């Protein structure tokens, strides 16, 4: 596939979306995001990282969708009680690095764990970490049940765009979360069947409507946490 849009045009599209999200990042970070996206789609031709293959569409559906949670993460980090510690986030079932790599590029002071079991995807993740010098990113190339053992009680937030089953997402996240840690699920909408999978001692504590520039479909961020004992 030949790209008919230049990196300059892609950058302009990204900057327009960042302005709509009221996100300020450096010019170099914006350029790195576009370089990552171009590399993503180059690999996608042979490694099937995503069903989305049109690169301009990817600015919205990959980059801006991933970054739409950043204002909420910034707010969480600003308010957390253990602010002296490095903020740590695990992206479960990250695929080609979404939302983890865009977040890592924009917030190099955070520690990002990319968790993915599919080998062709983890090869791309390792390649991207090296190519873009993402020293704040660690790739965990194994089943989450296995790789989570090394992160026991060390992660503030587990996030994912990959899980429809809240119950499974919570079960996989729990071993990694430190006290007060949260689960954040990015989804199209909340379905009754999803709610039925939540353990009785967990609950949906926040339901944010995400504003993804250029996307008409509904996107939401659900925050889940253990039920507080009275």
Image: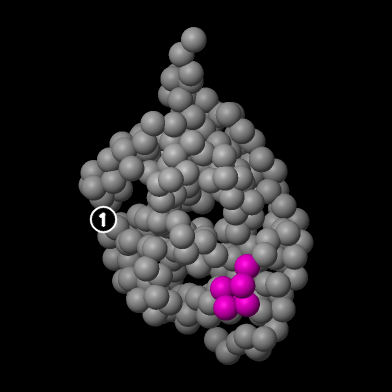
Residue 219: percent from the left, percent from the top?
A: 66, 48
Tell me where residue 161 appears, x and y as whole percent: 51, 51
Identify the residue at horizontal 56%, vertical 73% (top origin): 29
Judge the density around disc 1: few (<14), some (14-19), many (≥20) Cα neighbours within 10 Å.
some
Report the span colored magenta. Answer: 25-30
Which residue is at the front of the view, 70 or 44? 70
Render colour scheme: one colour
Is 130 contained in the magenta span? no
Q: Residue, x 75% and y 65% (percent of image)? A: 19
Q: Residue at x 72, y 58 (%)?
A: 21
From this view, report whether residue 157 is shown above or below residue 68: above
State which quadrant residue 180 falls in.
Answer: top left
Q: Is residue 175 left or right of residue 14?
A: left
Up-down relation of residue 136 to residue 84 (above or below): below
**How many labels, in total?**
1
Quadrant position of residue 58: bottom right
Secondary element at image label 1: loop
Secondary structure predominantly adopted by residues drawn in magenta: helix
Residue 29 is one of the magenta-drawn residues: yes
Q: Position of residue 228 (x, y in %)?
A: 48, 18
For the N terminus, the quadrant is bottom right
Residue 103 visible to an observer of this rendering: yes
Q: Is residue 104 visible?
A: no
Compared to residue 150, the image places residue 193 above or below, namely above
| Residue at the image point whose x is 50% and y is 67% from the top | 105
- Residue named by callout 1: 142
Residue reaching furthest to the top: 230
Q: Compared with residue 229, is residue 98 higher up or lower down, i.e. above or below? A: below
Q: Position of residue 176 (x, y in %)?
A: 33, 40
């Amino acid at each position: 596939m030949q790209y008919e849009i230049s990196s300059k045009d892609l950058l302009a599209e990204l900057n327009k979306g960042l302005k709509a999200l009221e996100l300020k990042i450096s010019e170099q970070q914006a350029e790195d995001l576009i370089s990552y996206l171009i590399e993503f789609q180059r690999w996608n031709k042979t490694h099937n990282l995503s069903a989305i293959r049109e690169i301009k569409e990817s600015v919205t559906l990959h980059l801006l969708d991933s970054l739409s949670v950043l204002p909420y993460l910034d707010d969480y980090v600003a308010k957390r009680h253990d602010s002296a510690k490095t903020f740590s986030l695990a992206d479960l079932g990250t695929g080609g690095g979404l939302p983890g790599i865009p977040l890592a590029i924009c917030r190099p002071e955070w520690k990002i764990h990319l968790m993915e079991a599919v080998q062709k995807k983890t090869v791309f993740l390792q390649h991207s970490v090296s190519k873009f010098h993402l020293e704040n990113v660690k790739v965990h190339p194994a089943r989450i049940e296995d790789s989570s053992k090394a992160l026991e009680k060390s992660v503030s937030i587990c996030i994912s765009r990959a899980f429809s089953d809240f119950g499974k997402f919570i079960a996989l996240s729990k071993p990694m979360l430190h006290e007060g840690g949260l689960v954040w699920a990015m989804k199209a909408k909340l379905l009754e069947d999803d709610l039925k999978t939540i353990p009785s001692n967990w609950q949906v504590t926040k339901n944010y409507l995400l504003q993804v520039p250029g996307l008409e479909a509904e996107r939401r961020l659900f925050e889940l946490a253990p039920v507080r004992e009275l």
